[in-house]
Image (tube, helix red, strand yellow):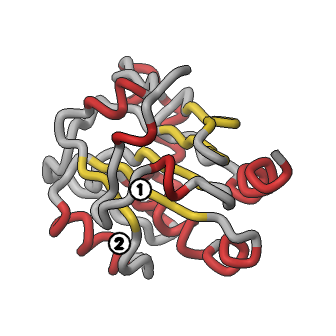
Amino acid sequence: MQIDLKNIKTNKGLSLYEISQGQPLMVVFLRNFGCVFCREALHDISDLKPEMKKLNINLVFVHMSDEETANSFFNKYGLPDVKQISDPTCDLYGRFGLSKGNFSQLLGLKTWVRGFEANLKGIPYSLKKLGDSLQMPGIFLICDGVIRGSYIHKRASDRPNYLELFNCCVTV
């Protein structure tokens, strides 16, 4: 996959290429903020901030909302001042090969069960439209301007092992 990382800038004005120089970068493409699995991902990543800091991993979130809406979610999950990219048209999602989900990926039985489990654990969902509800998420690991690994969700409900991803990122 050939993507010009020098021209993809965060809200802080830095390119993905610049951020990935000399230390690993994990770019997390989120589902819409109304999705229980998006909120679960924010919760999981927030819990792992100490490990990320220890491993010197940079983090950038890509989302489909405006920056103000995104900041309210990032703050709620203990991720203030995070680097982010607003992509309401999902152009960047497409450039990274992330597609729209089909019925089974978005609303299949396994997805419903996982959504119910996450909700029981206190992760809320919302029916408010906060982005493209068909867009699938993904994670990309970038080192020195090169995409070294990825996690492409097969279902909206997939829950990546972030620690494994962190370790992959630092051993490349």
Quarter of the image with the N terminus is: top right
- 121 vs 135, left or right, is right
Q: Nearer the viewer, mark 1 or mark 2?
A: 1
Residue of label 2: 74
Res. 22 image quadrant: bottom right
Label count reads 2
Nearer to the camera, 80 or 47: 80
Residue of label 1: 61
Q: Amino acid at mark 2?
A: Phe
Q: Residue at x 43, y 45 (%)?
A: 29
User: How far separated are the C-alphas under marks 1 and 2?
Assistant: 10 Å
- 159 vs 4, left or right, is right
Badge 1 density bin: few <14, some 14–19, many ≥20, Cα 10 Å? some
Q: Position of residue 127 (x, y in %)?
A: 18, 51
Residue 84 versus residue 140 in the image, above or below: below
The label on residue 10 is: none
Furthest residue in direction right, as rendered: 171
**Nearer-N-terminus badge (1/2):** 1
- 147 vs 11, left or right, is right
Quarter of the image with the C terminus is: top right
Q: Mark 1 and 2 residues: CB-CB less than 8 Å, in contact?
A: yes
Q: Residue at x 18, y 34 (%)?
A: 89
* SS for dot 1: strand
Nearer to the camera, 98 or 43: 98
Q: Position of residue 66 (x, y in %)?
A: 15, 57
Nearer to the camera, 74 or 156: 74
* SS for dot 2: helix
Q: Residue at x 30, y 70 (%)?
A: 73
Q: Amino acid at mark 1?
A: Phe
Q: Position of residue 107 (x, y in %)?
A: 39, 30
Badge 2 density bin: few <14, some 14–19, many ≥20, Cα 10 Å? many
Residue 171 versus residue 43 in the image, above or below: above
